[in-house]
Each structure stands twice: as structure tokens, then as C-alpha cells.
Image (cartoon, rainbow, N blue to C red):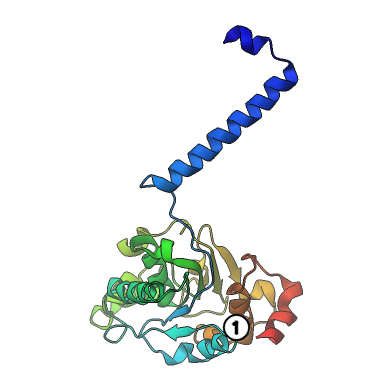
């Protein structure tokens, strides 16, 4: 073997080395796809959009955005959360998981998920604890307290009787949020406004591995309160772009007018 190898020209040795590396890479990719514990498969193809309401579960807050998505030809459903939307976030995760499974069972290639406020936390928990990573194509969150909000923390201390379970779970540093603080591993756009007085600090929406976009980085003159996020023209333009075929990228000031007008 040694004599055979040493008898080859340098050019042929290089060619054989390249071929060997290609074979190793192909085998490694096959093993990763077949062996349990490998990276989950990424769903291709565009399917329906599932919208998850915020704390309190009001579907009205997302009705305008859902209508705009339907106007593009996409199916869009605003989920109905159990109870009054202030109970265990894990129960809300199960509602999202069931809606996604129903869509896939009906033949959808994937789902896109939009989470408003606490609904974004539900999406984060779903991706981390259920089969969300295998079902979702991309996630968009709007003003979501992914690391908690001081208002919930204060409510749990000052008025514990007025802070239901979801409120407690949304407190800064809660065990539930601490368990899903890392990179979600799926394409994710997180939008928030610096004018937010509900999610404090607003940067709680920032998520490692996501495309993180404060609205004021796109339109410096944007004045958008937390409650205005789902129907704001800039947010709508950003969401519609994110739900398209193109890669998720962070827009800049040059995109401001087009995004507002295109919504």
C-alpha cells in the first residue's frame, strides 16, 4: 500500500484525497439524517400561518394582521387559547402543537408561526419542548418577553393574587423562561418597539440566533406602543416580507418607506 501510494504523482494523490473527503462527508450527512439525535429535518415548502395571541388571549388583537396575510393568498388562523389566556403557558403550547399537527396531517408541508407578546413565548416553548422544530418553517414574534418582563415580576411581588400562573411564568428569571433562553435553532424574526411599556425592558424580545429587529432601527421616527404592534403598518410590512420565500435578513433605514407602503 505504501509503495503504491508513494508511486503516485502528486497530482493523483491530491485528486484521490479530494474524492476521499467527499465520500466521508456524504457518509456523515447520511448518518446524521438516519441516526436518532441528529439535527432535526428542516421543513421545506410554505404552509398555513398560525397566530398566537398575547396574555389574556384576545384574538381581536391579531385579526387585522391575519386578514392582511390572507389577502396574500395564505391561510391564516388566530388560535383560541384555553381559558382566558392567563393560565399555564404550557397548556397554550399544547394548543399550538395540536394546530400545527392538524395542518401537517391535512397535507401542509410546514407551518409559519406568529406570536404576539406572550404568544411569542408560547412559540419559543413549543419549538423547544414539542415537535415545533420539525414542523415550523419560520417564526415571527412581536414584542415578546422572551426573557420576562419586570411588570410581571412586580405583579408577583406586590399583588400576587392578581398575578395568575402565566403572569408568574413571564416574570424575569422564571424557571420556565430560563429553560429556553438559548438559540431556538429555527429561522426566527423577533420584532419589538423601544416605546414598549409592557415588556420592560423592550430588549427582552432579543433572542440568540434570531434576526433581532427593533422597529426604530428601520424607521427612526416610529412611535409604536406594545398594543399597537400587530396592526402597525411597519410591523405588517416586516411580517409579510418575513413570510415570503426570501431569506430572513435584518432590514435597515433604506427599507423603511417600502415596508410601510407595502403593508
Q: Quadrant of the N terminus?
A: top right
> What percent of the width, then of the height, locates residue 138?
51, 68
Q: Quadrant of the C terminus?
A: bottom right
Would residue 122 be found to the left or right of residue 193 on screen?
Answer: left
Q: Residue at x 57, y 85 (%)?
A: 73
Looking at the image, residue 10 sits to the left or right of residue 168; the answer is right
Residue at left 69%, top 80%?
259
Residue 166 position, x and y percent, is 30, 76
Q: Is residue 236 above or below residue 242?
A: below
Residue topped by disc 1: 236
Q: Which residue is the extreme one toward the right?
A: 254
> In the rendered view, would you say 203 is above or below 219?
above
Across and down, in percent, residue 250 comes to 65, 66
Q: Can you see residue 25? A: yes
Image height of 209 relative to 28, above or below: below
Q: Nearer the viewer, residue 210 or 79?
A: 79
Horizontal side of 80 relative to 120 (left or right) equals left
**Residue in the foreground of this view, choosing between 105 and 53:** 105
Q: Residue at x 33, y 61 (%)?
A: 129
Query: Which residue lies at the image location 72% right of the left edge and 78% below the top edge?
Result: 256
Circle 1: is it few (<14), some (14-19), or many (20+) Cα within 10 Å?
many
* Residue 219 locus on image (x, y percent): 69, 78
Q: Is residue 37 above or below residue 68?
A: above
**For this view, does 179 lie left or right of residue 195?**
left
Q: Residue furthest top?
A: 3
Q: Is residue 147 visible?
A: no
Of 146 and 49, the residue lying toward us = 49
Q: Secondary structure at mark 1?
A: helix
Number of marks present in the image shown: 1
Amino acid at each position: 500500500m505504501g509503495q503504491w501510494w508513494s508511486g503516485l504523482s502528486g497530482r493523483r494523490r491530491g485528486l484521490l484525497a479530494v474524492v476521499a473527503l467527499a465520500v466521508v462527508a456524504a457518509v456523515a450527512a447520511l448518518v446524521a439524517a438516519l441516526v436518532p439525535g441528529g439535527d432535526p429535518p428542516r421543513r421545506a415548502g410554505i404552509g398555513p400561518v398560525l397566530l398566537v395571541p398575547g396574555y389574556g388571549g384576545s384574538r381581536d388583537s391579531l385579526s387585522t394582521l391575519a386578514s392582511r396575510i390572507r389577502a396574500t393568498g395564505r391561510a391564516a388562523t388566530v388560535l383560541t387559547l384555553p381559558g382566558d389566556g392567563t393560565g399555564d403557558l404550557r397548556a397554550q403550547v399544547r394548543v399550538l402543537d395540536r394546530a400545527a399537527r392538524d395542518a401537517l396531517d391535512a397535507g401542509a408541508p410546514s407551518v409559519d408561526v406568529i406570536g404576539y407578546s406572550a404568544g411569542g413565548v408560547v412559540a419559543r416553548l413549543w419549538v423547544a419542548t414539542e415537535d415545533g422544530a420539525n414542523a415550523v418553517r419560520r417564526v415571527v414574534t412581536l414584542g415578546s418577553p422572551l426573557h420576562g418582563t419586570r411588570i410581571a415580576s412586580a405583579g408577583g411581588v406586590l399583588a400576587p393574587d392578581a398575578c395568575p400562573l402565566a403572569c408568574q411564568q413571564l416574570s424575569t428569571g422564571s424557571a420556565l423562561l430560563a429553560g429556553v433562553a438559548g438559540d431556538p435553532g429555527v429561522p426566527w424574526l423577533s420584532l419589538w418597539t423601544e416605546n414598549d411599556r409592557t415588556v420592560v425592558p423592550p430588549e427582552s424580545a432579543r433572542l440568540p440566533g434570531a434576526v433581532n429587529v427593533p422597529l426604530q432601527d428601520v424607521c427612526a421616527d416610529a412611535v409604536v406602543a406594545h398594543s399597537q404592534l400587530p396592526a402597525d403598518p411597519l410591523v405588517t410590512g416586516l411580517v409579510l416580507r418575513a413570510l415570503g420565500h426570501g431569506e430572513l435578513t435584518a432590514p435597515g433605514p433604506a427599507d423603511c418607506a417600502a415596508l410601510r407602503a407595502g403593508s
